Amino acid sequence: MYPEQSAYLPAQRAVTVHQPQPLTPYDPGPSTSMDPYGERQTVVWVPDAYGRMVPMPKHLAPAPLTAPEPRDLTPLPLLDPIAQRFMGAGLGGGALAAGVGYGVGEIVSAAAGISGGALVWVAVIVLALRAPARAITSGKGNTVNIRKAVIKRNRFYS
């Protein structure tokens, strides 16, 4: 049952067959530099995060580390002299405040005590100074008291 032998032949029609061409990689042609030789940036090698050296344009590279100045390794005092002065001023000021507070407290307590006991003693001393000398010396003093008594009796019923 080949077509040549069959009585039925399909209609002849125009058929175009597409044959794809093999792809060729892009060939940019001869290598041309985009930047002239004079404008080319210098490249420096810097370490990356993993310790590998990678190229980088110099203007993008981090600033080089400068060596730190040597430290002064002379031993320092245990306490800073300025701190000692502040501490001394604080202790002295605290002692002064405590002394002033104690003194003011003593004065206030003495003033409060005057009304109770000291005024009683002041009153006793004043009364003792104003009392007659005979009362103080038990009657053996040189003070003479003259007493004149006038007794007049009126009897209206006699």
Image (tube, rainbow, N blue to C red):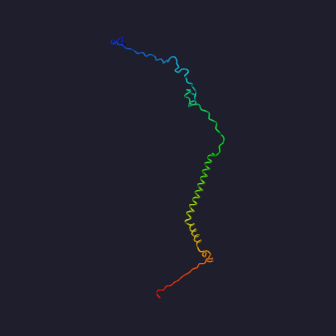
Quadrant placement of the N terminus: top left
In the picture shown, does residue 150 fall above or below 118? Answer: below
* Residue closest to the far top: 4
Is 10 or 39 nearer to us in this picture?
Answer: 39
Q: Quadrant of residue 69?
A: top right
Pick the front one: 79 or 91: 91
- Residue closest to the far bottom: 158
Q: Position of residue 100 (x, y in %)?
A: 59, 56
User: Measured from the top left, where is residue 57 in percent x and y?
Assistant: 55, 26
Relative side of 11 to 120, left or right: left
Q: Residue reaching furthest right?
A: 74
Front-lying residue, 105 or 35: 105
Who is closer to the viewer here, 158 or 48? Answer: 158
- Residue 111 at what x, y percent from top left? 56, 62
- Marker count (numbered): 0
Across and down, in percent, residue 108 comes to 56, 61
